[in-house]
Image (tube, rainbow, N blue to C red):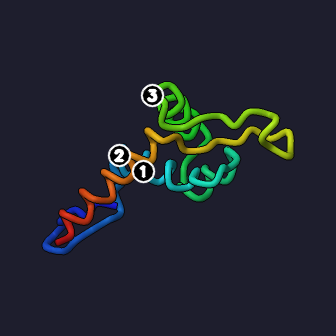
Amino acid sequence: MILVKVGGKLDSSHRSHIDIVADILDAAADGVKKTHIMYKCNLSFKQLETYLSLLLNRGLLRAVPEEERTSYARFFKITNKGQILLHAYDSLKALLAA
């Protein structure tokens, strides 16, 4: 999460789109259901649908095929491309914090 200076102090209450994308990718590292992403990333259902569509279309997240899952719920997992983006995000965040 990137910190923003508000009134002379650092505030992290406002997340950017890239912060939300990184949160979703991080949550999906081991495969996760929609509901888990929604609660872990503090998103509304409408926001979740928007971000999932974006991440799936960009190849950063993938829907886990039926043969790889044990229930009928839809699972999502980070792709190699998503891991590269998440690593770059973490590196940039570390540079800004230094």
In space, the residues marked 1 and 3 are separated at their CA atoms by 14 Å
Q: Mark 1 or 3 closer to N-term?
A: 1
Q: Position of residue 21 (x, y in %)?
A: 43, 45
Judged from the image, the secondary structure of the residue bearing numbered disc 2 is: helix
Crowd rating for badge 2 (residues with CA inside 10 Å; few <14, some 14–19, many 20+): some
Residue of label 2: 18
Residue of label 1: 22
Q: Position of residue 79 (x, y in %)?
A: 52, 40
Question: Is residue 9 shown above or below 54?
Answer: below
Task: Identify the residue shown where x is 70% and y is 47%.
Answer: 33
Q: Mark 3 or 2 closer to N-term?
A: 2
Query: Dividing the image into 4 quarters, which one contains the N terminus?
Result: bottom left
Residue 63 image-quadrant placement: top right
Judged from the image, the secondary structure of the residue bearing numbered disc 3 is: loop
Crowd rating for badge 3 (residues with CA inside 10 Å; few <14, some 14–19, many 20+): few
Quick check: marks 1 and 3 in contact, CB under 8 Å? no
Task: Identify the residue shown where x is 37% and y is 45%.
Answer: 85
Crowd rating for badge 1 (residues with CA inside 10 Å; few <14, some 14–19, many 20+): many
Quick check: marks 3 and 2 in contact, CB under 8 Å? no
Q: Is residue 97 left or right of residue 84?
A: left
Task: Identify the residue shown where x is 58% and y is 50%.
Answer: 28
Quick check: marks 1 and 2 in contact, CB under 8 Å? yes
Judged from the image, the secondary structure of the residue bearing numbered disc 1 is: helix
Residue 78 image-quadrant placement: top right
Task: Residue type at mark 3: give it.
Answer: Arg
Q: What is the number of the mark on residue 58?
A: 3
Nearest the viewer among 73 and 83 is 83
Task: Residue type at mark 2: give it.
Answer: Ile
